[in-house]
C-alpha cells in the first residue's frame, strides 16, 4: 500500500448550481415535506429495533440522528432509502411511500466507502453517472473537473488502496452526490477516521452541503459533529428506538470549525444534546 498525504481541502462548489443553503441564520423551511415518518416501527424476528418513530424533514434541511449504539439509527436510514420495508407505520419521501419510489429519490452512503478496489478513483466516482446511462469516457470527462473542487486533483488514476482514508471518503461522497438524488442519507461517513482528519472533513462537508443543497439525514455517534453539520438534531432512545428529543443547532456557526465548536452557544447546545442522550432511556 502506498502511503499518501492528504490532498489540500478544496472548497467544494455546486455541481448543479442549486439554491445555496444559508451559512448564517437557519433558512425558513421551504413548502412541503421531503421525508415523513409516521409511527414507524421495525423488528428483526423477535428483536424490536424501532418503535413509534415520528419525523418530518423539510426540503433542503440537514437533520442529524444521534443515540445509543444499537438503537436503530442505521436501520432507520435503510428504511427511508427503500432498502427495507417497515413492519409498522409509514414512510414517505417526496410524497411517495413505495420502496422503489423511495429508493429512486435517495442516495445512501454507508459507513464503509465501498469503493471498487480494482477501479481508479475517477472511475469509482463516475460509477454514479455510469449507472445513469453515461458512457465511460463521457462519465470521466464530466467527473474530472470535480476532482479539483473536491481536493482530489492528481489522484484520478489512483486505486482506493493507494488513497488515504479521508480521500476515499471524499471520492465516496462525490459518487453519492453524482447519483443526482434529492435526498442524501449519510451513515457515520467519518467514523473510521482519526480525530484530525475527521475534523477537517466535517468542515469540508459543511461547505459541500452549502454549495450543493440537498435534503440530508446524517447518522452519527458524535453530538458535536451533528450540531456542526446539521440544522436540527433528533435524539433516539435506547432500543427499540424512538425520538425522545429534537434540538435546533446553534446559528450562525463560525468558521473555521475550531471557532464554531468553542463558542458559548455551541457549547450550550452540545450540553443540552448530551443531557437529552443521557435521558434517552425508555
Image: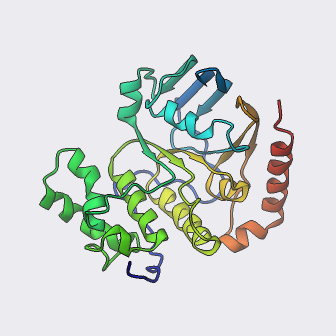
- Image quadrant holding the C terminus, namely top right
The vertical placement of 264 against 87, above or below, is: below
The vertical placement of 143 against 50, above or below, is: below
The residue at 81%/37% (across/down) is 280
The vertical placement of 189 against 241, above or below, is: below
Q: Position of residue 22 (x, y in %)?
A: 57, 55
Q: Position of residue 245 (x, y in %)?
A: 78, 37
Q: How is the image coloured?
A: rainbow
Q: Is residue 221 left or right of residue 4?
A: right
- Image quadrant holding the N terminus, namely bottom left
Along the line of sight, which residue is nearer the eye, 99 or 159? 159
Q: Is residue 75 left or right of residue 47?
A: left
The residue at 33%/46% (across/down) is 180
Q: Position of residue 63 (x, y in %)?
A: 61, 44
The vertical placement of 132 against 78, above or below, is: below
Can you see residue 255? no
Q: Is residue 184 left or right of residue 180?
A: right
The residue at 54%/67% (across/down) is 201
Report how many numbered discs are placed on residues in the image. 0
Q: Is residue 147 left or right of residue 185?
A: left
The residue at 40%/69% (across/down) is 150
Q: Quadrant of residue 169?
A: bottom left
Can you see residue 54? yes
Residue extending farthest to the top is 88
Q: Position of residue 161 (x, y in %)?
A: 37, 70
Amino acid at each position: 500500500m502506498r502511503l499518501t498525504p492528504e490532498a489540500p481541502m478544496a472548497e467544494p462548489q455546486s455541481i448543479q448550481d442549486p439554491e445555496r443553503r444559508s451559512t448564517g441564520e437557519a433558512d425558513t423551511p421551504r413548502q412541503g415535506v421531503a421525508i415523513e415518518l409516521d409511527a414507524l416501527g421495525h423488528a428483526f424476528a423477535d428483536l424490536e429495533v424501532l418503535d413509534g418513530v415520528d419525523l418530518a424533514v423539510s426540503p433542503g434541511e440537514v437533520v442529524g440522528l444521534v443515540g445509543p449504539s444499537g438503537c436503530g439509527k442505521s436501520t432507520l436510514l435503510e428504511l427511508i432509502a427503500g432498502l427495507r420495508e417497515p413492519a409498522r407505520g409509514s414512510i414517505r419521501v417526496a410524497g411517495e411511500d413505495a420502496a422503489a419510489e423511495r429508493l429512486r429519490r435517495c442516495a445512501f452512503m454507508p459507513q464503509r466507502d465501498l469503493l471498487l478496489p480494482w477501479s481508479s478513483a475517477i472511475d469509482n466516482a463516475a460509477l454514479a453517472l455510469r449507472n445513469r446511462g453515461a458512457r465511460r469516457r463521457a462519465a470521466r470527462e464530466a467527473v474530472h473537473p470535480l476532482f479539483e473542487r473536491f481536493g482530489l486533483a492528481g489522484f484520478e488514476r489512483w486505486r482506493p488502496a493507494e488513497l488515504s482514508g479521508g480521500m476515499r471518503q471524499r471520492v465516496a461522497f462525490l459518487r453519492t452526490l453524482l447519483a443526482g438524488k434529492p435526498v442524501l442519507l449519510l451513515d457515520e461517513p467519518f467514523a473510521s477516521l482519526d480525530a484530525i482528519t475527521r475534523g477537517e472533513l466535517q468542515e469540508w462537508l459543511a461547505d459541500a452541503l452549502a454549495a450543493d443543497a440537498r435534503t440530508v439525514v446524517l447518522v452519527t455517534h458524535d453530538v458535536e459533529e451533528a450540531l456542526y453539520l446539521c440544522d436540527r438534531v433528533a435524539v433516539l432512545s435506547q432500543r427499540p428506538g424512538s425520538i425522545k428529543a429534537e434540538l435546533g443547532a446553534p446559528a450562525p456557526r463560525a468558521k473555521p470549525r475550531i471557532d464554531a465548536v468553542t463558542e458559548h452557544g455551541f457549547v450550550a447546545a452540545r450540553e443540552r444534546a448530551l443531557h437529552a442522550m443521557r435521558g434517552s432511556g425508555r
